[in-house]
Image (cartoon, rainbow, N blue to C red):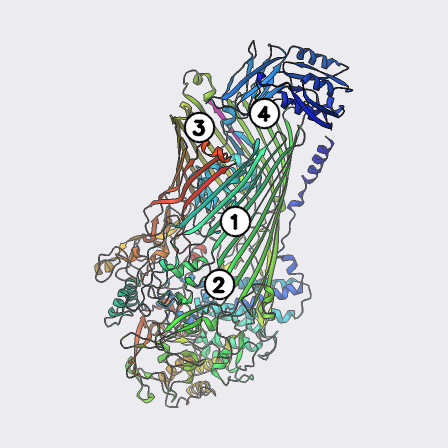
Amino acid sequence: MKKILFIAVLFSCFSCSDDFLDVSPQDRISEEAVWTDPNLIIAYHNSLYNGVPHGFGRHMVSKFSDEANSVNWDLQRNTFTPDNVAVAGTANENFFYYWNRGYAYIRKVNIFLEQMEEGTLHVPNKDRLVAEAKFLRGFMYFELIRRYGGVPIVMQSYDLGEEANFTRSTFDECVSFIESDLNAAITGLPEKYASTSTDFGRATQDACKALKSRLFLYAASPLFNPSNDQAKWQKAADAAEALLNRGYSLHLDYRQMFIQPSGSANNEIIFARLFSASNSHQAPITNINRRYGGYGGWGASNGPSQNLVDDYDMNNGEPAFIYPGGVKTINPASNYNPQNPYVNRDPRFDATVLHDESVFRGNVHEMWVSTDGTKWGFDSFKQSGDNPRTNYALLKFAPNADVPLNWQTLYTNPWIHIRLAEIYLNYAEAKLALGDEATCREYINKVRARQSVNLPPISNIVTGEELKRRLYNERRIELAFEGHRFFDVRRWKIATVTESQPIYGMDITKDLATGLKTYTPVQITARTPFQEKMYLLPIEASEILRNKNLTQTPGW
Amino acid sequence: MKLVILLTVICLQVSASAVSQQITISEKNIPLEKVFKSLRKQTGYSFFYKVDLLQKAKPVSLNLNGVTLEEALSKCFEGQSFTYEILNKTVIIKPKAVSKIDKIQENRAAQLAEITGKVTSEAGEPLIGVTVVLKGTTMGSSTDVSGNYSLNVPDNEGTLVFSYIGFETKEVAIGNATTLNVTLSPDAKALEEVVVVGYGEQKKETLTGSVVQVTGDDIVASPTANVTTALAGRLPGLVVNQRSGEPGRDDPAILIRGTGTLGNNAPLIIIDGVERSQMGRLNPEDIESYSVIKDASAAIYGARAANGVIIITTKRGALGKPEFNLSLNQAFNKPTRVMEVLDGPMFAQVYNEGAWYRAGRPANWTPVYSEADIKKHADGSDPILYPNTNWVDEVLKSYSLQSRMNLSLNGGTESIRYFLSFGTMHQDGNFRYSPTSYKQNNFRAKIDVNVTKDLNLGVNISGMLNKGSYPSTNTSTNFINILNANPLLVARYPNGLIAPGRLGENPLLQDKVGTITTEEVPIFSTFTAAYTVPFVEGLKVSGTYNYDMTNRFEKTFRTPYFFHEYNVNTQEYDQKQATVISTPELTDRTDRLTTSLYNLKVNYDRTFDKHTVGLLIGTEQQKNTAQWVSAYRRNFISTAIDQINVGSNAPEDKNNGGSASFSGYNNYFGRLNYNYSEKYLVEFVFRYDGSQIFPEEKRYGFFPAFSAGWRLSEESFIKDNLTFVDQLKLRLSHGKIGNDKVGQFQYLQTFSFGDNYVFGGRDVPGIFPNTMPNPNITWEESKKTDFGFESSLWRGLLGIDLTFFQENRSNILAARNLSISNIYGFSGLPDQNIGKVRNHGYEIVLSHRNSIGDFDYNISANTSFARSKVEFLDEVPPAEPYQALTGRRVGSPLYYKADGIFNTQEELDSYPRLPNAQLGDIKVVDVNGDGLINAKDQVRFDYTATPEYVFGMTLGAGYKNFDLNVLFQGQTNVYNLDTGFRGLGGSNFSNAAVARAKDRWTVDNPNGTMPRADDITPSNNTFWVYDASFVRLKSLELGYTLPKNLISKVRLGDVRLYVSGFNLLTFAKNDWADPEISGGAVIYPQLKVLNLGANIKF
């Protein structure tokens, strides 16, 4: 009996204790700890930078424009609607439907700014961190307005249960708000960091200025400036001009600029998203063709389009095609030979596009199919469905033979948000709109004169609409696959033409007996006509239903 | 505690005439007891004495040869402090100084008379080991192997009490008889089912809750590798859907009474008293019973039990001699169904069509595959360049092996009972050239000891060693590489070299890609103590301590691999490294999970005349921990050794991780039963439950339930008038239960590490906020009401059980994401107690049991129905009223309504359509009639992938030595969306189903019933929804027990041989894939199993 009593007593000791329920999380930190520890505050701040998306996701923005072929994206086929637009919202699409992602990071910035305002804790470089946060918030709003036009401006953080009425501000109000954020940021930031510095990648005064240049260019563009208000163009010109003499210079080697790892010397970059071994990307392998294990851009559908290829000039400086009366015609002055289309082109073509007879990593690439169809080149779509059907693969970000090309290599080549060449082209565009054609040509030609590109200048006889076409084309070529084309054709309001055309590829037939090749452009993806309302993206339908005061993008 | 041992003749049936009085003993210094034993053997005389008397006895030395009993005894008793007396073949030992008690004894003994007889069952079989006691005394005997007993009784006025486990105790007055043959009848009460309920057992007859039970023996009849799958169809109210048949990864989804909540619907699984995992991996031969608590009586499990409770009890030792039970099974399995996919020529044809449509149907067009190409693929003249590959046949084996062996030992005496078992199971994968296999070892030791008459201690320790082996590519990828692989790709060149296959991921290379090996070692232990308080009748105190620990180790070794690719130009087979992985990489991960649980219970069970009272009060505390660490390295110099230290030591080639989490429960529970004459039954259960998942002030809740029953069959108006009624019961229950199955710490705003960034080419750490906090979060509340009717008529010829239930779930934990704008930018929305769901339904069980001569059979059929309705939910105001989920079934999806396809241009032109719709696309109904096809035209589809009706029918039959066990199982009111089936002729070269391609729309087949290749209609349309109703011959077992006379020669107790099968036949509307999968056919299919087995007892 005594033993049993003992056991009973023992057991009762274990009951009635509440210790079982006092458990604290082991795998996360409480909010209180965050705002009382400078190291955690800095860590919080670091993550704010991820609010500005880079473009190295599996599906590049190019897939939504005429740069690449993408049979499955509604955004390319012009069949996107408020019902399906949000599909392109994950990391795979670089958060292209940025609405949710953008506002989530804007809230984080707002919380940070509020905490820094209230907090009495000593945080090293507090002013700089606050300035960086404001730059980032400006950038996030810019990403929103280039997609949706005017959006609701949220300047404070809300708690769950707090009610707010969100209504869209006008585009110009948003521009002013971003401008004020950038102006505030500039005062707290250093001018610049060297590209080899351990701080490179942080916001700088120059990054603020560069973003302003882009912002004001957008604001002055036909889509957002229907009255062609010259003051807006002037503002854009001034903003670009402010960066012309800040010590940046064009990288000598156009191809090298995109494949050198983070931390390399590069005096052209003004703001970039860097990568490291533990925080790397797979863009080179994702986009390369099957020979190297790539999928030609995931499912072989990121292959550059014939539409883009046709727009590369010849190395004599002449465009391959001209458009007399709006009809696409071979430019006789260019010496373009449609049956030998890849020779004597703008050197940026070979630096960007992998095509038939390209030599890369010691391999001659073969995209042909024999006349009788019994044989084909190893890089032909016939060999593997993972070679792009266009017969072009994206080379721009893929490293040379000194770096392994496979799925395990941790690539660190940076995503360049803003570089000097863009500023030159921004400047040229603004100057053209202001009637200063000479300066426009001067800055286009600066870009074309890059050592490794070395194209003849655009002559003084090119003026007016023709100069504008050359300017637009220069931007398309120089900044190809850098996330510009989708937005540029919209702000220029030329998408009704460019985005209605089908996507073409190139069929290459080889006569095995003679070795002669025949080149025939082939229509691969038909597109429904681009409609006016598509200039700005619709907001997901359910988001409109959630917000009584939020208006859908016009036309949707 | 004076123990009196009755040395009785049990072994030898000795007739008086055969007794030889010639005694021979030659021993030195042996205890008297041993002498008695020897004497008993030699003479057949019983010895009768008190144990403590003999303790005083001196050892004796004897050298006797052919003496009489009397002589031998007098030798033994020389100098001893006691003497003896012989009466009717019984030797009574008594002290020389006679006490009062002994005097009585002596008086009785003085008039001893021998009674003999035989005890048999109703069938005439002798019963062995029946206890025969003279009522009111300790004098007794037991029957021998022939059922005979003999006992000396003092006079003829006594009564003999015959008792035997499983039989009704019988009392027979001796009268003048010297021979008493007795027939015992089975104890109806002992045979009547006892049902396991929360923290106890109850008689099925007087049960007031909705609890159904199936025995482990029934489950064993299904030769499936995962025991849980064998439950399908056997228990009304239980929905079991297996979605994958992959060895070791084949746990089915289980629901009790369908879906009751918008959140987690998983039931609580209690194995031997503790919430435990690995239900599917239990050894089926260890299981005594599965009990499913469906109604409010689950309230005894409080805040975790709203989705119902499954209680699994394992076997314990049975009284009797040690018995070994060996079972051997060898099975052959193959997929139930594999989708039939297109052959090469058909594929090429379809691809051509798709490409032409994508390019905008140009008039001038060169197809990707020319007529000549297609012909070559078809005629097989050039298997290298123009192959026609059947990937399914190439990769899947025609059958694979599965074996199971089990050996158990069980037995026991009054003081100790034991059950020891060891089981092993091995299941091979269904791919060729694949490391896929699963091996499982189970052991269990369960021992109960009656330390004293009042104190019982027990231990139940079980463990498993589960080893899985899989290729490093995941399963669905493998099936994509089989079912979606282009048939125009070579699988294997004629010279035997393996080709790249789809994306260089040829599934024939699975044994080259590296392996994932898992090793899981859960150890479950339960220690119990039960003390029957001697001075208060019916009072019992018991407690358990349980400690479970699971160690899991997972090694993922991914290795570079090679294939050969034919080069058309050089005509060589180039060996190429697949680019999927370029350098070996290894991840080791260990997990350690523990649960410790204490409980203490007080039971008081007593009958006062017609009033029976049962009371249980208990308390329980539980603590769980989970911890893991992982290590990663890559760039191994060699793949010969898959150990972490062989990997590169460079910082960028290494990585590691780890974390931990803890949780706990604290609670008090109880049950009060009362019945009057087993006629009027009432019960009250409760739990006061504290769950650590919720904030401090919201942690504790009170969950009560009340139930009552009325056994009409016990009323005299039925008993006297309707004699065919065996059982007729009405029952009712109502109560409140909780559901706390949500993430913990949702009441805190926390941050996690991650969201790192890079400055200057170096990583900088980041942190990011987790889900927004909800300081008010608490459990879901379920109010359940059950009404039941149970009957058994004509001694089992007909049984009807009916249960109706209704459940109102409120405070449902769901995130508010539906109505909260993204502009707030919240970092994930916490679960809030916002939803309301109503669930109702019924269950019917009909049973029939009969014997005709040697033929015994029973049939039981069950159907259950459960339908949920969302009463409230934080819904975005839907664009159209018909899109609201509120008012519909939980999980009702939004689908476009398909109305055939656009067969003609007129049809296409005259009806609203998607902007890029073409001829041959699915015609989507413009539901709101606005002339546009957009998301507003999606309508709520009424059914989901969870069936509303599930049914099962078991047939059991026995004829002489044959036994048969059949289970049919099925479901209806269930629809799956199969988006995988939809694809045809897409740009990604995916293969497609024959059923999809067969009658597709083409320019030449404008009246096709299937859409064109590359149809662009959004896939969530009703065209791709299929009725997943089916009826299955789920399991069948036919056994034959070898005749006893045949096997008694080899000293085996019982030998039974059997054949059995699982998923043998399927009748379904859907004919391209197994109907049980939940949409999309690229998963490891369910398996059909054919098994041969033997049971041997010895």
Nearer to me, B1008 or A272: B1008
> From this viewpoint, which residue is outermost toward the front?
B65
- Whether labels 1 and 4 belong to a single chain: the reply is yes
- Whether labels 1 and 2 belong to a single chain: the reply is no
Give the magenta part as a residue range: B706-711
Which residue was labeled with disc 2?
A152
Q: Residues within 10 Å of mark 2 (few under 14, many from 20)?
A: many
Q: Quadrant of residue B573?
A: bottom left
Q: Residues within 10 Å of mark 1 (few under 14, many from 20)?
A: many
Q: Is residue A538 visible?
A: yes
Label 1 and label 4: CA atoms lie apart by 43 Å
Q: Name which residue lies at 59% across and 64% down.
A: B644
Is A21 situated left or right of A528 in this image?
Answer: right
Q: Viewer-nearest of labels 2 and 3?
A: 3
Q: Name which residue lies at 69% across and 66% down.
A: A122
Give residue B440's mark.
1
- Whether labels 4 and 2 belong to a single chain: the reply is no
